[in-house]
Amino acid sequence: TLMAIVNKAFAELTINQKNPFENLTIHKTDDNASKEKEPYTRQDLTKLLSQARRLDDERRRIVIVLALTGARLAEIVGLRRKDVDLINNSIQIASHESRSLKTSASARTLPLLPMALEAIEKQLSDHTGDFVFPSYASKTEVKADSASAALNKWAKTIVNEPNRTMHSFRHALRDQLRAVNCPDAVSKAIGGWSEGNDVSSSYGLGYELDVKRKWLTKAYEWVKIT
């Protein structure tokens, strides 16, 4: 919380210096350390993607898009039809009346890898509503918690490991990008992670979609689902 406050002040006042709270850590007790989310491994991802593609329904399509974008669950569940660009094969993560975003860095455009694109296209063809996943999103609310409970319960039947949840896909994204030596700034742009106290990171238009697609494709080129 202290880091966020100071980062916001530095950005607004154009102060380019190190955040004094940047390296502040909270001691991990046995209790809170055991609750930390673990990333899905490549084997885990393969199992989940295979089963999700086989079932091919609304819930499993959410899983596929989560797994291959590393986005936050609420960001995917709250997607509107107009956030999907089928010409450029991408989605726009944007705040709207029924779903805000965690940080300003969360607003971004993400490329859709072929399997994720297929899931989105099938979902859009199944209905004519304004929201991509209408079971969990409407103009009044985005039921990310309900989606999380249902999807985590299903995922446990496939990968029954401790500390694995839908949020583990974000941790997995970080690992997969590291594995292909993706530049840290590009990784943050894909994941919607803040650049901390680097004020210059907010300048310009950011990385082009093709740059993100290049690194995301490299990160998940090992995925072979039949």
Image (spheres, rainbow, N blue to C red):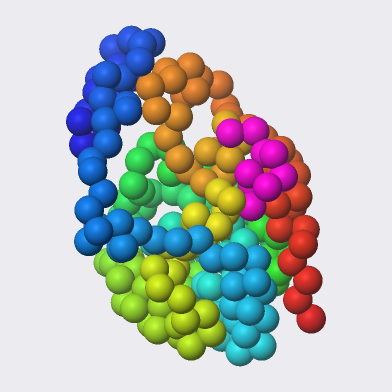
Taking the magenta stretch, the answer to whether it contains residue 182 is yes
Residue 71 higher or lower than 17, as above or below: below
- Residue drawn at x 62%, y 85% as measured from the top left: 51
**Could you tell me how many numbered marks the image carries?**
0
> Which quadrant of the figure has residue 137?
bottom left
Q: Is residue 13 left or right of residue 190?
A: left
Q: Position of residue 27 (x, y in %)?
A: 23, 43
- Residue drawn at x 66%, y 58% as measured from the top left: 112
- Residue drawn at x 55%, y 57% as measured from the top left: 172
> Which quadrant of the figure has residue 61?
bottom right
- Residue drawn at x 42%, y 18% as measured from the top left: 199
Taking the magenta stretch, the answer to whether it contains residue 57 is no
Residue 87 higher or lower than 67, as above or below: above
| Quadrant into which the N terminus falls | top left
Q: Is residue 222 left or right of residue 143?
A: right
> In this view of the protein, which residue sits in the foreground, 24 or 1?
24
Q: Position of residue 144 (x, y in %)?
A: 34, 68
> In this view of the protein, which residue sits in the foreground, 119 or 63?
63
Q: Position of residue 171 (x, y in %)?
A: 50, 55
Residue 151 seen from this side: no
| Quadrant into which the C terminus falls | bottom right
Q: Which residues, given as a range, are shown in magenta? A: 176-184
Q: Position of residue 14 (x, y in %)?
A: 35, 11
Residue 199 seen from this side: yes
